[in-house]
Image (cartoon, rainbow, N blue to C red):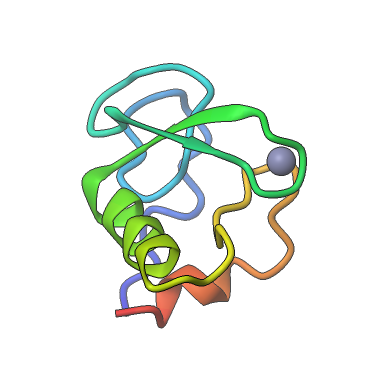
Amino acid sequence: MLKSTLNHGEQGITSSHPSLYKTGPNLYRLLCCKCSVICYVNETTFQRASRAILAGADNPFFCHNCEEEPEVWLFAE
Ligand SMILES: [Zn+2]
């Protein structure tokens, strides 16, 4: 698992992190399950959350403010 993008602090396309506005690959809206803020996520994240919700699980999506265990998304696939 490459972590080379973790230290890039500049604003830009972040392929795996939700944003509060539609940008780059973040074209899909998800509500944070904790604070219900609307976030935009990429297709992969959206599909993971959709699969969980369709399977009857709770919305697993946390916005970056509520995110407590980011590893969840790293090993989800
Ligand atoms: Zn939140």
Viewer-closest of 56 and 49: 56
Q: Position of residue 45 (x, y in %)?
A: 35, 54
> In the rendered image, which quarter contains the N terminus?
bottom left
In the rendered view, tell whether residue 49 sits above or below residue 12. Answer: below
Q: Is residue 42 left or right of residue 37?
A: left
Q: Is residue 36 left or right of residue 11?
A: right
Q: Position of residue 6 (x, y in %)?
A: 47, 55
Q: Report which quarter residue 36 is drawn in.
A: top right
Number of numbered tags placed on the structure image: 0
> In the rendered image, which quarter contains the C terminus?
bottom left
> Which residue is depicted at the point 62% across and 51% down?
62
> Which residue is depicted at the point 38% across and 53% down?
5
Viewer-closest of 39 and 7: 39
Viewer-closest of 2 and 68: 68
Q: Is residue 52 left or right of residue 37?
A: left
> Which residue is depicted at the point 25% across and 26% down?
24
Query: Ligand 1 is found in which quarter of the picture?
Result: top right
Q: Position of residue 58 (x, y in %)?
A: 58, 65
Q: Position of residue 75 (x, y in %)?
A: 41, 82
In the rendered view, tell whether residue 29 sits above or below residue 53. Answer: above
> Which residue is depicted at the point 31% across and 32% down?
26
Q: Is residue 53 left or right of residue 71?
A: left
Q: Report which quarter residue 15 is drawn in.
A: top left
